[in-house]
Amino acid sequence: MFEFILRRLLIAVPTVLLISMFVFGMQKLLPGDPVLAMAGEERDPATLDALRLKYHLNDPIWQQYLYWAEGALHGDLGTSLRTQEPVTTLIAQKLPVTIQLALMSLAVALFIGIPAGVLSAYRKGTWVDWLSNVVALSGLSIPNFWLGIMLILLVSVRLGWLPASGYVSPWTDPLTSIKTMLMPAFVLGSALAAALMRHTRSAMLGVLKSDYVRTARAKGLPERTVLVKHALRNALVPVVTVATLIFGELLGGAVLTEQIFTIPGFGKLVVDAVFSRDYAVVQGIVLCTAVAFIAMNLLADVAYRLLNPRMRVA
Amino acid sequence: MRPTKRFLILAAALSFSAQLAHAADLRIGLQEDPDALDPDQARTFVGRIVFASLCDKLVDISPDLKIVPMLATGWAWSDDGKALTMTLRKGVTFQDGTPFDAEAVKYNITRSQTFDLSRRKAEVKSIASVDVVDPYTVKFNLSTPDATLLSQLADRAGMMISPTAAQREGADFALNPVCSGPFKFVQRVQQDKIVLEKYAGYYDADKIHFDRVIFRPIPDTTVRLANLRAGDLDLIERMAPTDLASAKADPKLQTASAVSIGYQGITVNIANTDQAKNPLGQNKLVRQALSLAIDRDALNQVVFNGAFAPGNQPFPPTSPWYDKDLPIQPRDVAKAKALLKQAGLDKVSFELQTANSPDAQQVAQVIQSMAAEAGMDIKIVTKEFATMLKDQTAGAYQATQVGWSGRVDPDGNLYGFVVTGAGLNDGHYSNPEVDKLMNEARLSTDEAKRKTAYDAAQKILLDELPIIYLYHPVWLWASTAKLQGFVPYADGMIRLQNVSLKN
């Protein structure tokens, strides 16, 4: 197991390196001039030249990349052109928010998706199956921004139950923190639940037909034990894959949902950064997201092995 | 179904401990996240709203755009217009305790001129040197007379920051700004909030009625208004014109408005690269026809529910600088067609680039359909803003639908756009007569003389139309009905002196 993890970590190094080069190159392909975006309405030529010089924008692109990479190796991801804040500070501010939103959304998705998937597989073809499908699909097809605004208008403006927006750290006030994140987590989670439900359902259908389930039933085990201990556990492998992929994606930031609920996560930061050509910020976040994604994949692989002993030998 | 219900029950349970804002907090919803919080580095409109609470300026403006005292209590021009002497307010300290005096003013101007990240260089270029006459008198010696200087000092170039903090922090000053305004900086989380708290040592402290001000950037106008309605904000800026009616109808809210000093229009490429070689760029008759084809009132009604102010000059019709002899011409399609015929054309087509915001696209579409009726075929090219700007500067465009946020001094709305070789003259328009009048107006501090020069220039500009002015945005604020003392200003700023929340 240890060797397996180590090997995967070693493969991750060139992957991250390639991603950072790719993103750096892509950004330079963006039309528009970062200095023009930075200079302000007046665009005074002397200011433009000073900014170009300061941020090495006259140098060839490979040299600019090396400046960045050298800093990154020393733990310095540069400063935001837009606000002068160090990129590491920004990541430190936003990463916990993004992780909290991702975890809560995933929890909502799992809470809805897995039971719905199990039930609809177990009661295939009945009204339970039909209803689960309708609920899951409507979660998937309702646009996030619409659901978000409707929830704000209903829950915050009309009923006054939850704050309409904002973020409070769980370390300062856990209850308020959960309250402010509840609606965004629900909006994101309800959309993701559909994918989880469909995957759980199809995996369960396969497993329920298998020999060992029939054996378990023949042994006279209670239906609940058959379903949860024998069938679900085996059906979970593909579900774990989907869930970790979803989680990795959530760590990249959820632009629309963050925008509507004013959650200061990665999504808003990276979009603002792209529009103001704030290269260092985009680069830093992409790097961080890539690392998170790789870590998630590794975690998924470890989870398979824990869930399914047959994979441990592979 | 069930999870939704469970969620609602949970939400209800949690709401028993609903968090209430501190009574003396003011929560303001902004349309964008400000950029660097350093008056010398800052470049955004929204950043200036935060500065209005954070940093006092040498002079301020009144709601009718007159220059009024702030940190300078009085000023006088020398007879040749090449020296400005200011008397400074006594007993003022920066938020770190550093005293405010003539040396501090000198430091601030020097920083604006020499700091490598300064965006203020052009604004204070006319100042050749600063003399500290005595601790409370400062004299600006100018290289040429500059009528616009006072209005520059009424904006970011005149914001005084603590020399102690600026010297210590350098470019990092933006992370922890120390100024001279009524509120001092506490905390910032990008895209989330900027928190300021009352500065006890403020010279005008009895006019300040809040302990803290919290600025929250919420870009979506619907969501911003919903937050105000839910009681999570007290005041929002730049409400969407389409929401005005419903906000006015809500007894828990109140609204305020002011016609802005900026404008929106069509900047035509007159002579910047070969792209200018098209009928619109080459022939003023075609530009006149386009202007006549546009019904500015209808445009305002369709896109902005009639909440904005139609216009045909760089200054709104409410401005003292507006030339009343050149009013907005009503739409006249027949005359527009006749002008095209006079130009020897019966069908004209050109590209109009526009930003990808919904409003900008709608404006372009309305213009497109109006112009079509006059025989002009407009192809709309939608671009992301930074790209559009770059193409415009580089001359890779025929016409751009773009605007200007506006400056207090008329010079700021005209000079850079129409004078030969000026920084913002992307269409490369050039007319020696206009250049002469613009420079005359800039060099004189006599308002009547300046007005005559601007009026004369407008006659030429509205005939040749390098920029076809369309409308002036109107600043719209909405707040809880409890807010009192808020005064709308044409510059769109939020000044918190004498503002309070009644219980």
Image (tube, coloured by chain):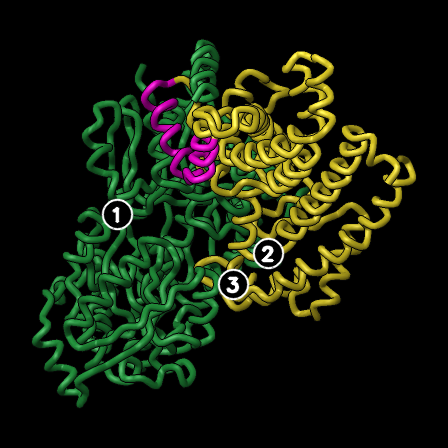
Chain colours: A yellow, B green
Q: Is mark 1 on a helix, strand or loop?
A: strand
Q: Answer with the quarter of the image where residue B94 lies.
A: top right
Three-letter amino acid code at the position of disc 3 = Leu
- Element class at badge 2: loop
| Residue found at the far right of this picture | A3
Q: Residues within 10 Å of mark 2 (few under 14, many from 20)?
A: many
What's the amino acid at mark 2?
Answer: Leu
Q: Where is residue A217 in the image (x, y as percent from the top left)?
A: 69, 18
Mark 1 crowdedness (10 Å alpha carbons): few <14, some 14-19, many ≥20: many
Which numbered circle lies on residue A36?
A: 3
- Gap in angstroms between the C-alphas marked 1 and 3: 27 Å
Q: How far apart are marks 2 and 1 (CA)?
A: 32 Å
Say whether marks 1 and 3 touch (CB < 8 Å): no
Nearest to viewer (mark 2 / mark 1): 1
Secondary-structure class at tag 3? helix
Tell me which numbered mark, 2 or 1, is placed earlier along the sequence: 2
How many numbered markers are drawn? 3
Q: Position of residue A17 (x, y in %)?
A: 77, 55
Give the residue type at disc 1.
Val
Residue at the spot of label 1? B474
Give the residues drawn in magenta, as a range.
A133-160
Q: Which residue lies furthest to the front in this view?
A: A218
The subunit letter for the residue under badge 3 reads A
**Looking at the image, is mark 3 or mark 2 nearer the viewer?**
3
- A117 horizontally vs A92: left or right: left
Q: Which residue lies furthest to the bottom in this view?
A: B344
Residue for badge 2: B117
In the picture, residue A58 is in which quadrant?
bottom right
**How far apart are the alpha carbons under marks 3 and 2?**
13 Å
Q: In this view, does B365 lie above or below A96?
A: below
> What is the x, y in percent for residue B311?
20, 59
